[in-house]
Image (cartoon, rainbow, N blue to C red):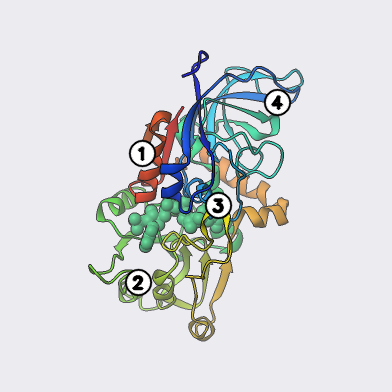
């Protein structure tokens, strides 16, 4: 530790894969408390930083937004305002805030990309901070925007999910998957949630899913098992109205067989086939996610791509209503993110390994 007691994680070069990057190229370094602030800047003492799937993919440049090393990971975080610049009016020292990963940190596009949350401090522009909503803890607040804005963008903006409809949520124990379970229930939908672990699915059920299905294939068969008959039986023989697919690969194809005519298929991500780009930021990997057009055609399906951030960059106006819905739910106490794991910053490698292994349910966080 430095004399001032701070530390930050630094990724010195991109890896071939996330595990390669975290074992070979990631280090914890001393960090001095930043001593100068611009007039519109805020110094945040980070209390909790989310350890997300996208943080992992970024380590090897296998996410669409490639960071330039050396960089500090940590897309989303929350903390206490330590100091404010001379012209900052909206927040003051001592207040608890969350930082918007869209405006600051490695996923942002402007000049604050260096302000990653795996660090004791971050200097961010005033517009990046927002007081903690409702009664959220730092851990819960650090696990809010990315996952819940994704769930709302997919289910509401793209999927038009209605009360009384049935939605099949894949990867439901994951960060965006569990957010989708919460959001779908708040919208009044019925949720059939899938995953590969009975233990994790028990938590997903306790978090509100109406039915959980373990879709793990028998040993040695890979992919997902057949589950269309169960979904059909649960929906009076008709099939689900919507599928929220953050997993990809085999489960997507099986899903097409348990949807009702005219259903919506929301493409959210591909946790099962993460390497759609090459390591070290390379592009042009073979595409592991292909859907048969005959099933899409004959079932009259709407297949909807749902890239939350890209859609918001293209049309920034979609963000305000999404955030209003989200913050109303949080302020009224109806929505509380679930965080299963917390690690000290010194255990950053173990935190990233746990996320990669799939130990986490909902969110995992680091405490600088
Ligand atoms: N559309 C968007 O704007 C957007 C935003 C954020 C993230 N994403 C993408 O959405 C996907 C999920 O993100 P996340 O943050 O929820 O990830 P996550 O927290 O790692 O969760 C993914 C879940 O998928 C399941 N899974 C993982 N590997 C699997 C496999 N081989 N077969 C079946 N299920 C598997 C796991 O559940 P079980 O272990 O229970 O099976 C896991 O909990 C990622 O591809 C991510 O890049 C998209």
**Relative image position of residue 246 (x, y in whole percent):** 46, 60
If you read the primary sequence from the N terminus, does the residue marked by circle 1 or circle 2 appear first? 2
Other residues around mark 2 within 10 Å, as few (<14) / some (14–19) / many (≥20)? many
C-alpha distance separating marks 4 and 2 = 51 Å
C-alpha distance separating marks 1 and 3 = 20 Å
If you read the primary sequence from the N terminus, does the residue marked by circle 3 or circle 4 appear first? 4
Other residues around mark 4 within 10 Å, as few (<14) / some (14–19) / many (≥20)? many
Give the residue drawn at x 69%, y 18%: 36
Say which of 308 and 43 sits in front: 43
Q: Is residue 164 left or right of residue 92?
A: left
Q: Quadrant of ligand 1?
A: bottom left
Other residues around mark 3 within 10 Å, as few (<14) / some (14–19) / many (≥20)? many
Mark 1 CB lies closer than 8 A to ligand 1? no
If you read the primary sequence from the N terminus, does the residue marked by circle 2 or circle 3 appear first? 3
- Kindly identify which numbered label has been placed on residue 350: 1
- What residue is shown with label 4? 41
- What residue is shown with label 3? 61
Say which of 243 and 49 sits in front: 49
Give the residue drawn at x 61%, y 59%: 157
């Amino acid at each position: 530790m430095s004399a001032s007691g701070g530390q930050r994680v630094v990724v010195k070069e991109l890896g071939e894969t996330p595990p390669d990057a975290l074992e070979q190229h990631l280090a914890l370094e001393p960090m001095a408390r930043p001593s100068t602030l611009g007039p519109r800047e805020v110094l945040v003492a980070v209390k909790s930083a989310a350890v997300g799937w996208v943080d992992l993919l970024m380590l090897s440049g296998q996410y669409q937004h490639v960071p330039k090393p050396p960089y500090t990971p940590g897309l989303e975080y929350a903390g206490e305002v330590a100091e404010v610049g001379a012209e900052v009016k909206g927040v003051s020292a001592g207040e608890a805030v969350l930082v918007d990963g869209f405006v600051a940190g490695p996923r942002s596009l402007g000049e604050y990309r260096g302000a990653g949350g795996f660090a004791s401090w971050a200097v961010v522009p005033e517009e990046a901070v927002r007081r903690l909503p409702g009664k959220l803890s730092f851990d819960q607040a650090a696990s809010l925007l990315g996952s819940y804005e994704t769930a709302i963008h997919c289910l509401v903006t793209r999927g038009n999910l209605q009360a009384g409809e049935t939605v099949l949520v894949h990867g439901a124990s994951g960060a965006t998957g569990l957010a989708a379970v919460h959001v779908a229930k708040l919208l009044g939908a019925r949720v059939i949630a899938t995953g590969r672990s009975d233990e994790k699915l028990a938590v997903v059920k306790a978090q509100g899913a109406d039915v959980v299905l373990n879709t793990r294939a028998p040993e040695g068969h890979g992919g997902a098992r057949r589950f269309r008959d169960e979904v059909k039986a649960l929906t009076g023989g008709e099939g689900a109205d919507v599928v929220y697919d953050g997993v990809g690969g085999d489960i997507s194809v099986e899903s097409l067989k348990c949807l009702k005519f005219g259903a919506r298929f929301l493409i959210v991500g591909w946790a099962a086939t993460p390497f759609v780009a090459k390591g070290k930021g390379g592009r042009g990997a073979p595409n592991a996610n292909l859907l048969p057009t005959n099933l899409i055609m004959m079932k009259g399906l709407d297949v909807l791509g749902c890239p939350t951030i890209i859609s918001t960059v293209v049309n920034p106006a979609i963000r305000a209503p999404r955030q209003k819905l989200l913050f109303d739910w949080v302020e009224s106490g109806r929505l509380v993110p679930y965080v299963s794991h917390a690690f000290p910053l010194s255990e950053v490698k173990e935190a990233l390994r746990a996320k990669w292994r799939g130990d986490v349910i909902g969110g995992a966080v680091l405490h600088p």
